[in-house]
């Protein structure tokens, strides 16, 4: 993980998992996919409500998965920094 990524994630994680999942998963990914898959490439058997439920739920899953991946990378980097004794960026609470 590069220093820029490390710093960005340290800031993002301060907002908490709920906020990250809501902004990154639901609003950024879920809503975008809903609009594309409902109005640009519509599925003939799904209503608009079903499509919204599908993509917003999938957005939650995506947001949680991305949180877990980024958190794993961040913690791994924190351990690397601790063991190297560089004293850079301690993990945020």
Image: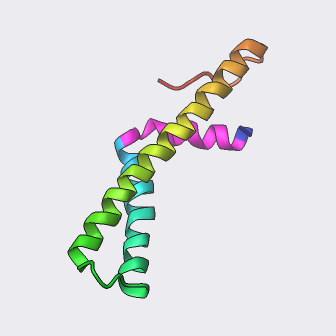
The N terminus - image quarter? top right
Where does the image place residue 91, in percent across and percent down from the top left?
Answer: 57, 23
Please indicate whether residue 42 sits to the left or right of residue 85 in the image: left
Where does the image place residue 63, in percent across and percent down from the top left?
Answer: 43, 50
Residue 8 vs residue 17, the one in the foreground:
17
Where does the image place residue 9, in percent across and percent down from the top left?
Answer: 57, 40
Q: Is residue 86 above or below residue 75?
A: above
Residue 56 found in image quarter: bottom left
Give the magenta-colored segment's residue range.
4-17
Residue 38 vs residue 32, the one in the foreground:
38
Q: In terms of secondary structure, what is the magenta stretch mainly?
A: helix
Where does the image place residue 47, in percent across and percent down from the top left?
Answer: 23, 79
How is this picture coloured?
Answer: rainbow
Residue 33 found in image quarter: bottom left
Please indicate whether residue 6 sits to the left or right of residue 83 in the image: left
- Which residue is pictured at 52% across the width and 26% down the height? 92
Q: Is residue 88 above or below residue 3?
A: above
């Amino acid at each position: 993980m590069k220093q820029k990524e490390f710093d960005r994630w340290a800031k993002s994680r301060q907002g908490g998992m709920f906020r990250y999942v809501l902004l990154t998963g639901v609003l950024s990914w879920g809503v975008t996919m809903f609009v594309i898959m409902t109005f640009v490439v519509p599925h003939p058997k799904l209503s608009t409500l079903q499509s919204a439920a599908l993509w917003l739920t999938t957005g939650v899953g995506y947001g949680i998965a991305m949180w877990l991946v980024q958190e794993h990378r961040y913690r791994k980097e924190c351990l690397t920094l601790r063991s190297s004794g560089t004293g850079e960026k301690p993990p945020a609470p």
